[in-house]
Image: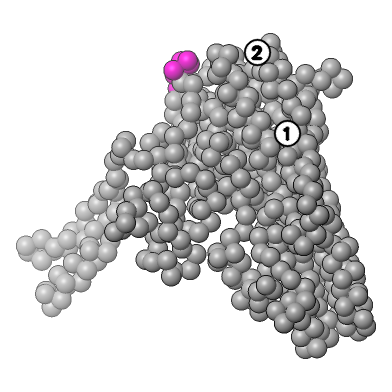
Amino acid sequence: MVAWRLLTIFVQQAYQPAGRRAATVRADGVDTVTPMKYQVESPDRSDDVLDCPNIRSKLKPRPSPFVVHNNWGGGFVSNDDRVALNSLKFASPESAGATCTAGNGATADEPAWLEASMEQVCMPLPPWAVRAGARETIFWNPKDVHVAVVTCGGLCPGLNDVVQGLVNKCTDYGVPEGNILGIRYGFKGFYDREYKPVVLTKKSVEGIHLEGGTMLGTSRGGADIKQIVKQIDLWGIDMCFVVGGNGGNAGAAAIQAELEKNNIVCTVVGVPKSIDNDILLIDKCFGFDTAVEEAQRALLAAKVEAASARRGIGLVKLMGRQSGFIALQASMASGVVDVCLIPEVPFTLFGERGMFTFLEKVLQEKGHAVVCVAEGAGQDILSTGEHRTDASGNPILKDVGPWLRSEMKAHFKEADVKYIDPSYLIRSIPTTSGDRIYCKILAHNAVHGAFAGYTGVTVGLVNTHYVYLPIPVVIQAPRTVDPRGKNWNRLRASIGQPNFF
């Protein structure tokens, strides 16, 4: 009996999580309980980390104002905390979603297998990123800080949420009322004489998260970086928060470089925005989930229209210039889509493997069909050889929706084709609850990063943890759907969609 008790306690101790109380047995057979201490791995300063620039050498360290309550009881993030950039270790290239990559410790004898989507990053990356969050030591005196907030590029659900989060957290740090400026209509608002900056306070941003759009206004491209830096210096701005996509973050990086060139002390921190979810490395951009939720409404309407007609076809065009994430996620979530076409995957309409052959089978089996197409899909078919871009450098696309509708009507003579284009409707609405929380956390971490002395960085969610990333890393190219990845594979498996090429 004693032997059985000893064996039982041995097993309990062997699988006891650190920090629990562990039972032991004295020589006289009496059970005792002793506390076990948590085992914490010491930070390794030799870790290969994606370095984030900072201007701490030009600033004076001081305790955070949140030290008095230990950051509301939640504690502080260490500068040595790390977040893994690659969350998986693949056994071989045959593992779903794996690819071989140079660097990251790879050799001819021992290759490193990473997620195929990591190939989109055009440089070797270290294994770790800097964790975002409040630091115990800050490098600005909050009462002397002056802040500028600017929103750039196209609209996206959550812009007002982020503006509100930035203002509220700066105020929580102790930035005085009147010291936070909202820049009107994008980067040009720094020097536009017609639209002056507005003072942002907790009172002025109260409730703006309940509305779509941005209270500051926005615009695309055409910024004069030298003039912006001149105004930052003239106004005595210490922190500049840029809420924008690839173009906006590129502008933020250019501003930071010009500030450094002119020896002007100011931190520049980005909050990445993209309705297309096309920012590299980041799990998702704010507003994306809201856009997907709204896009489903169009798909469900197309389902009703198609199912109510004889040989009905519901065709929905969704946003997605170079990245088909909205079309993919909305198709997967709605459960009504039979065909999904995205920019990353080529397709043909005719022939044995053409999309129309598959669509005819669906019509014969179900009597109706729903097709979802991203706006950037099929551009190789529609291209006339002319490549134009808008003010932000985005390609100006041929309109795939009306073209596909015409082709369907010509091919399926007796079909009733209904075309729905929700267009800007999916980006001009208030955020869902999940996005609202996400925006607030991103905004707060941006402010924490600025007070920690970081500059030229953007904040994002990587492998479910918040990190700071150097802006040049995330703006190399748009993030795209990986045709070999699990997300696209899951959709195809779910709806039975073959390759149309």
What distance separates the C-alpha of mark 2 from that of mark 1? Answer: 20 Å
Q: Earlier in the sequence, mark 2 or mark 1?
A: 1
Q: Is residue 128 left or right of residue 475?
A: left
Which of the 4 quarters of the picture holds residue 450?
A: top right
Q: Position of residue 486 (x, y in %)?
A: 55, 66
* SS class, disc 2: helix
Q: Position of residue 274 (x, y in %)?
A: 69, 46
The magenta stretch is: 57-64
Q: Nearer the viewer, residue 182 or 457?
A: 457
Q: Is residue 428 left or right of residue 92?
A: right
Q: Residue furthest top?
A: 234
Q: Residue furthest bottom?
A: 365
Q: Is residue 47 left or right of residue 118?
A: left
The type of residue carrying mark 2 is Asp
Q: Position of residue 83 (x, y in %)?
A: 43, 46
The C terminus - image quarter:
bottom right
Residue 109 vertical position relative to residue 48 in the rendered view, above or below:
below
Residue denoted by label 1? 151
